[in-house]
């Protein structure tokens, strides 16, 4: 019996030893930063005074939060983030669903097309951003002989006048439109992959049964495919919201570090705001903003989970 | 509505391109199913029963041949336009819908002149549910039902649109023995009440025999025999059919005919007038043995099993091709369990002989070939 206990203990120690590299790394790079973020967020004015070089004692309080929320720039960032998320998540989910269903329906070239649709996933998002910039850009804007990007050229074929998407003086909604297209494009491959996987695991007999019952195509889609895919759809929506709230690199990719078109309204997002605060040695404000972002994501995810549990249960 | 299958053939292309091994799932199937009958499609696993059913439903396209519903050639009609009800082997109930929604589903697809209003649909659904006695379970999901209940929902869903043809693919294979017995009676009752022409696929001969008006016995995609269950049982056309039908199974012997007599292990066991000398397989139904101390056929006794009304004598014989010889005799007959051997006389109409090469039936005495067709 005693031997047995010793053996267990020894086995446990072995387990701990095997786990220790991962645990140490997690402690250093995940647990400590989280703890530190909490600490900095509740140290009034942390960072600001540190820069001055003094060994100051910081008071605990919620001053950082008050400052962040009271500051107009943050609310703009919140608005931009929300707008982009609310526009892109449904759009990309629906598009991904349609593409996945179509991909699943065609037999020839399926592999090839899957690869094409998957390409954006393995391409750097900043690089894609730069390509998008080129597509929407107007070179020599304001001169007598401007050269339009491919999008304006295509619109031109349909008789639409060139639109100032991203150049100096471009409007907020034109900027947002470009961002939405970019983000949706970027988000598609992952969603298609997940949904296609789900589709391919759906029992084909449900479709045979639907055929026998003379079910119209659209009804098959809405009444059978979508409900059977609902767990995957829920997953894609939840991760989509989380990704949407962390949107940042797409804006840098197209509009650069400034995160706005020349002379245009700010397109900064929450994560952009946090980076900016860090860059200006406002660690306290950055931490407070990070916690606010976390709280928002947490609440939205909870709502998502609650809704999807009700909708996907079968 | 009668169904006519004419030279129906289905060939599946080989799976990998290198080998040219096509699978002939169904070969040259021709038969007519009279209006309002229940037909049992019977055969071992992989003999092409499901494929036949799927071709009738339209889910699979025949490689050759034609299918008629009544006078209409439906061969190239899509399943949507055939108006059949199909119960899948594993039911294929929509898991996210309640029983009610599942049964309503086919009705909600009706278009144009057939379109029903909500109340009529509900009424029809309830009517179908009552027919299969699941009207208490309308708000449950399929996952909350037992196998037997799911099967009934599947039947209700197939029946609710009043199909011209009802197709059932091994509908009882997922049920336990007791439920299977009960449900097959119910299928029979429902079919009688609705009068819908029904095809019932099964690999269980007892199941097919017990509820079918007509059975179609298949082997490797080829029809062996078609007829009333009792006729097929009493008068099989070949060894395969004789072996496939009946519990306990028929006893098969290596035998030969000489001078109009059937010899098994050197004993002349039966007169077989009209058969020339040759090697044959002799098959004897368990109820074809009559124990008699002066009997013509001698077997070594293995055991005696008394099962209420009947006594089952298990014996052996060196010419037998089945593992044991099982005969069923009246309980009145007393055999001493300590005896070494047992002697039988044979009932001529329970003995079938088959060509040793082709395994086709050889008729003797007053035996005649069964009427083909239904
Ligand atoms: N989709 C298919 N592709 C290739 N072969 C098939 C396919 N479906 C069935 N088969 C083959 O056809 C034969 C008959 O199958 P099936 O009709 O399902 O038999 P059963 O229902 O009598 O058990 C089998 O040999 C099976 O392997
Ligand atoms: Mg089958």
Image (cartoon, rainbow, N blue to C red):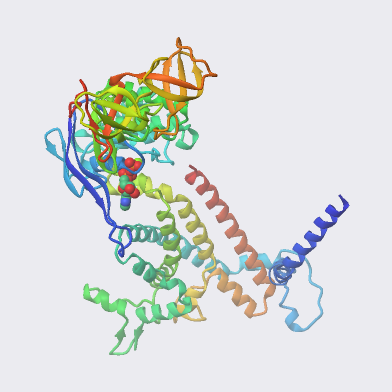
Which corner quadrant of the image does residue B78 belong to? Answer: top left
Q: Which of A145 and A2 is in front in this view?
A: A2
Which corner quadrant of the image does residue A107 belong to? Answer: bottom left
From this view, report whether residue B101 is shown above or below residue A66. Answer: above
Residue at point 47%, 74% (across, down): A250
Residue at point 47%, 32% (across, down): B145
Q: Which of A161 and B140 is in front in this view?
A: B140
Dividing the image into four quarters, tell me where ligand 2 lies.
top left
Is residue A208 at least partly visible in the picture? no
Is residue B68 at least partly visible in the picture? yes
Residue at point 39%, 33% (across, down): B319
Number of marks: 0
Residue at point 33%, 64% (across, down): A110
Image spot of residue A183 (x, y percent): 44, 69
Image spot of residue A6 (x, y percent): 85, 56
- Left or right: A302 as drawn, with respect to B344: right
- Left or right: A253 as drawn, with respect to A214: right
Q: Nearer the viewer, residue B189 or A286?
A: B189
In this view, which residue lies farthest toward the right? A2
């Amino acid at each position: 019996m005693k031997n047995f206990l010793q053996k267990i203990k020894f086995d446990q120690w072995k387990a701990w030893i095997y786990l220790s590299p991962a645990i140490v790394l997690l402690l250093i790079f995940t647990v400590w930063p989280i703890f530190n973020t909490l600490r900095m967020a509740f140290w009034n004015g942390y960072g600001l005074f540190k820069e001055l070089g003094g060994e100051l004692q910081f008071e605990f309080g919620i001053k950082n939060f008050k400052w962040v929320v009271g500051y107009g720039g943050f609310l703009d960032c919140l608005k931009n983030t929300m707008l982009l998320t609310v526009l892109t998540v449904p759009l990309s989910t629906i598009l991904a669903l349609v593409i996945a269903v179509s991909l699943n329906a065609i037999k020839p070239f399926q592999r090839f097309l899957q690869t094409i649709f998957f390409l954006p996933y393995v391409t750097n998002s900043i690089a894609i951003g730069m390509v998008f910039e080129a597509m929407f850009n107007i070179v020599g804007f304001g001169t007598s002989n401007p050269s339009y990007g491919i999008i304006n050229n295509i619109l031109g074929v349909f008789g639409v006048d060139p639109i100032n998407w991203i150049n100096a003086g471009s409007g907020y909604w034109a900027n947002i439109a470009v961002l939405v297209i970019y983000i949706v494009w970027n988000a598609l491959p992952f969603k298609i992959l997940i949904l296609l996987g789900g589709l391919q695991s759906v029992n084909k007999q449900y479709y045979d049964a639907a055929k026998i019952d003379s079910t119209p195509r659209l009804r098959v889609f809405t009444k059978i495919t979508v409900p059977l895919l609902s767990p995957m759809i829920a997953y894609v929506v939840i991760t989509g919201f989380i990704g949407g709230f962390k949107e940042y690199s797409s804006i840098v990719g197209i509009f650069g570090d400034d995160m706005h078109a020349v002379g245009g309204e700010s397109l900064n997002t929450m994560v952009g705001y946090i980076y900016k605060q860090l860059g200006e040695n406002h660690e306290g404000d950055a931490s407070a903003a990070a916690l606010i972002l976390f709280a928002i994501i947490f609440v939205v995810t909870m709502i998502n989970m609650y809704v999807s549990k009700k909708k996907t249960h079968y | 509505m009668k169904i006519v299958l004419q030279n129906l053939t289905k060939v599946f292309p080989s799976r990998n391109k290198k080998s040219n091994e096509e699978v002939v799932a169904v070969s040259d199937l021709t038969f007519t199913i009279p209006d309002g009958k229940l037909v049992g499609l019977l055969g071992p696993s992989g003999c092409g029963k499901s494929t036949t059913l799927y071709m009738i439903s339209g889910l699979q396209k025949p490689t050759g041949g034609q299918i008629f519903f009544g006078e209409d050639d439906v061969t190239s009609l899509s399943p949507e336009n055939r108006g059949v009800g199909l119960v899948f082997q594993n039911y294929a109930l929509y898991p996210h819908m309640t029983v009610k929604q599942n049964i309503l589903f086919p009705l909600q697809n009706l278009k144009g002149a057939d379109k029903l209003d909500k109340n009529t649909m509900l009424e029809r659904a309830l009517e179908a549910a009552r027919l299969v006695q699941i009207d208490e379970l309308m708000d449950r999901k399929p996952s909350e039902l037992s196998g037997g209940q799911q099967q009934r929902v599947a039947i209700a869903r197939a029946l609710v649109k009043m199909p011209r043809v009802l197709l059932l693919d091994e509908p009882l294979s997922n049920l336990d023995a007791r439920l299977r017995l009960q449900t097959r009676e119910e299928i029979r009752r429902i079919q009688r009440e609705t009068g819908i022409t029904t095809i019932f696929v099964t690999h269980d001969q007892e199941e097919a025999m017990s509820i079918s008006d007509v059975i179609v016995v298949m082997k490797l995609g080829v029809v062996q025999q078609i007829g009333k269950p009792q006729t097929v049982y009493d008068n099989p056309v070949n060894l395969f059919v004789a072996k496939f039908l009946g519990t306990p199974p028929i006893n098969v012997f290596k035998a030969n005919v000489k001078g109009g007599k059937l010899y098994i292990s050197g004993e002349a066991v039966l007169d077989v007038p009209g058969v020339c000398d040759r090697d044959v397989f002799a098959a004897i139904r368990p109820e074809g043995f009559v124990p008699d101390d002066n009997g013509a056929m001698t077997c070594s006794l293995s055991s005696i099993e008394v099962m209420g009304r009947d006594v089952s004598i298990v014996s052996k014989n060196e010419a037998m091709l089945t593992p044991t010889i099982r005969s069923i005799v009246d309980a009145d007959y007393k055999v001493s369990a300590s005896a070494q051997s047992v002697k039988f006389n044979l009932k001529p109409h329970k003995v079938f002989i088959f060509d040793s090469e082709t395994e086709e039936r050889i008729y003797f005495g007053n035996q005649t070939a069964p009427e083909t067709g239904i």
